[in-house]
Amino acid sequence: MASSPQAGGRVLVTGGAGFIGTTLARELADSAEQWVVLDNLHPQVHPGSEPPADLPASVDLRVGDVTSADDLDAVVADLRPDTVVHLAAETGTAQSLSESTRHGMVNVVGTTQLLDALTRAGHVPSHFVLTSSRAVYGEGVWRNRDGSTFQPGLRTHAQLEAGTWDHGDGAAHVPNSVAGTHPNPINVYGATKLAQEQILAAWTGSHDTRLSVLRLQNVYGPRQSLSNPYTGIVSLFSRLAREGRSIPLYEDGEITRDFVYIDDVVSALVAAIAHKPADHMRTVDIGSGVKTTIGDLAREIARYHSAPEPHVTGQYRDGDVRHASCTVETTLRQLDWQPRVSLRDGVASLQEWIATQLD
């Protein structure tokens, strides 16, 4: 991470007691005039609704909900933040199909409630930082056999039931195609994250303030919830391998993702917070820049634990994208940042941390 990072001023972090927020606070909170976290300590993320033990003592934790006008009014009127880091979100892709209202309330209404609280307080922060998602891109760009490109939509339930995993007749996904791709979400979660971006862009543009949007790939690492079934496959695979079980692979095991280590994500957030965009808004992709199949990820984790070889099940999740990855060259230029942790080193670090939690 960057040496001697400085937050400065008064910082409000929504959802700041979670995985990313806790790690970010350990890096920056001590350098801020005030570092206030608003978090509802949802039991899906925080068993027993307890705050994480490793939140720094300098963090002012306010237990409250971004969907509550009263909770936001109390924090905003008191703090009048210079910087708002908006992390609060529901994140489960599959869960968003069965709990669409919950995702819409937290991700969309929670964002508008935050803005309305600022309006009621007569206050405009100098900088908003939003953690968005690679889910806004949907399937990204694919290339036909004739060389033409297209952006496919949702893989239908019937298509997945038939085991037809890819799009088109012989079409191939364009590797690392996210940067510059037009957003085209194909699940409820992705649609709500894109709505967050658009709402914040409209409000900040109208108030002549700055907005940084960081579209995160699949984040993993220490402090990730081990009890939340929607927290991500890296921690799930790790627990299975620790138990000596064969890791099940959905579809044909060739789903691809960009797995980015938490320290690299936080260093990108540190850079974004420290350096406001020159113009109204900047949007950057945060990933490792490396495309990895879930089969390769599972084999890496299994290797670490000497677990059995992973096995393909043919199961699938409705609303899932087949491939997702990004290029980071634009981000390197705009944030003076680069990912540093390889998948092998990140997986090993996560396993070491899990051991301290479960042994």
Image (spheres, rainbow, N blue to C red):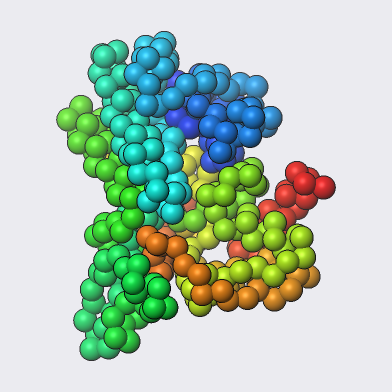
Q: Is residue 306 above or below residue 59?
A: below
Residue 275 seen: no
Which residue is at the front of the view, 288 or 106? 106
Instruction: Residue 102: give x, y in percent of width and height.
Output: 38, 38
Q: Is residue 127 above or below residue 256?
A: above
Residue 92 seen: yes
Query: Which residue is at 41% across, 17% downward?
Result: 71
Instruction: Residue 89: give x, y in percent of width and height.
Output: 42, 39
Answer with the quarter of the image where residue 9 lies.
top left
Which residue is at the front of the view, 236 or 268? 236
Question: For the view shown, which residue lies furthest in the right direction?
Answer: 359
Q: Count the numbered circles shown.
A: 0
Q: Is residue 111 above or below residue 354?
A: above
Query: Which residue is at 52% across, 49% downward?
Result: 230
Question: For the view shown, which residue lies furthest in the left direction?
Answer: 206
Instruction: Residue 303: give x, y in percent of width and height.
Output: 73, 71
Instruction: Residue 300: give x, y in percent of width and height.
Output: 66, 69
Which residue is at the front of the view, 313 or 123? 313
Query: Which residue is at 77% across, 65% downward?
Result: 244
Query: Which residue is at 51% across, 75% downward?
Result: 314
Looking at the image, residue 341 sits to the left or right of residue 317; the answer is: right
